[in-house]
Image (cartoon, rainbow, N blue to C red):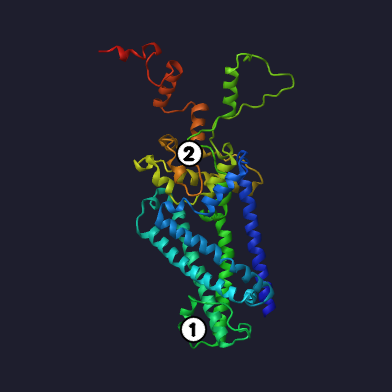
Amino acid sequence: MQIVAQILFVIALVAGIGFFARNIKRLIRNIKLGKEVDRSDNSGERFAKMARIALGQSKMVKRPVSGFLHIIVYVGFIIINIEVLEIIIDGIFGTHRIFSFMGGFYNVLIASFEVLAFLVLVGVIIFWLRRNFLNIYRFLGRELKGWPKNDANYILYFEMVLMALFLIMNATDYQLQLNGADHYASEAGIMGSFPISQFLLPILEGMSNGTLIIIERAAWWLHIIGILFFLNYLYYSKHLHILLAFPNVYLSKLTPKGEMDNLEAVKKEVELMMDPNADPFAAPAEGEDEGEPEKFGASDIFDLNQVQLLNSYTCTECGRCTSECPANLTGKKLSPRKIMMDTRDRVEEVGEIINKNGKFEDDGKQLLDDYITREELWACTTCNACVEACPIGIDPLSIILDMRRYLVMEQSAAPNELSIAMTNIENNGAPWPYNQMDRLNWAQEK
């Protein structure tokens, strides 16, 4: 029976990791649908920023209650899963607590895992209560109805169950060691230290070794299968940020938040205008191909760059951006969180078409209008509050600006007020409807 269990374990492990690898491959393909962007500069500064924000959680603690709880859950869940390595080795080779040879250090490790598991369990329960009963503004957005709300709860349930299974597994294991059961007991004494799960022993009192083994094996199998399922569920969940937060922060902009990117085509045109020696009417040099004119701005995900698409997949849907957005707070439709969610949904829609047909075939949809409305785009004040608020360096404003560029430069579809201001700038050198010669007339008035 032991060899059968080992074979089944290897099959489950290979299947879980294989499915995860397939999803990661699709994720990378989808992100590469965007335009390439060079973020290879200042690697030292980028690594420092990643260590400070993604690893050190420096922006999370600006909201101390949720930030502290998130650090507990984040650190605890990551460290506890170090034991997964031991579970994998035990599952493949049929051993029991293979790392117990480390003696006292192993006892400290298991004890630490248990304390962290309990803290994670408490933290996740508090998160669940906050999300479902405290009516916190950023969890009430219209974009969080249906699947996004359920997804957040599913993850919390997953973590509760995984931590509970971990403690039950340890409690029954501890009881079997105390009972001297074959395969569990060791001549060296008790393997591990169980400061939390020991409180479950009264529940197990009086149970036979056979019953305890069934409970321990069931908890062990459900725990590792649950972890593999959780790993593959990440691709379909907002919790993909667990994997993507690090590259997302590393590739985020280092320039000042208020600095906008220049369109290369416009920049070249301005340089040509400013060069007194240039001939604007000169024909292209022989053999030089001017190529197709560059599209201004973005109307669909193919016009965005790869970092922007990575941003959309990394979004945690926490709503910190939306809760800081002055347009949203005054009742306008704009929600920076929804901008990121809509972008990801469109990328996924395109990805599914590629999965089905082997290539993208025009489906008659685009990000503009079909997902993000013009009203949302023009409600933005470009204040950068959303960018500053994001705990992992996501930039919703860059997508908004690119889509507004498309509306203005490709469709001439700016709001009337903005069109008047731009016409005045072109004619009068200022946004006001006054001739330059009359600009100082106010100073002559008595």
> Looking at the image, is 146 positioned above or below residue 405?
below
Quarter of the image for residue 363 reads top right
Q: Evaluate whether residue 154 shows in this view.
A: no
Q: What kind of element bears circle 2? A: helix
Does residue 48 lie above or below 436 as drawn?
A: below
The label number, if any, that marks residue 397 in the structure image? 2
Residue displayed at 62% across by 53% down: 24
Quarter holding the N terminus is bottom right
Where is residue 116? Give x, y as percent. 49, 68
Corner quadrant of residue 267:
top right
* Residue located farthest toward the right when viewing the structure as drawn: 287
Q: Position of residue 212 (x, y in %)?
A: 54, 83
Residue plotted at (55% across, 51% down): 51
* Tag 2: amino acid: Leu
Residue 21 falls left or right of residue 369: right
Q: Going by the image, does 2 lie left or right of 207?
A: right
In the rendered image, is residue 359 in sight? yes
The C terminus, quarter of image: top left
Instruction: Specify the amino acid type for callout 1.
Output: Leu
Instruction: Identify whether 221 is placed above or below 406.
Output: below
Q: Residues within 10 Å of mark 2 (few under 14, many from 20)?
A: many
Residue 204: mark: 1
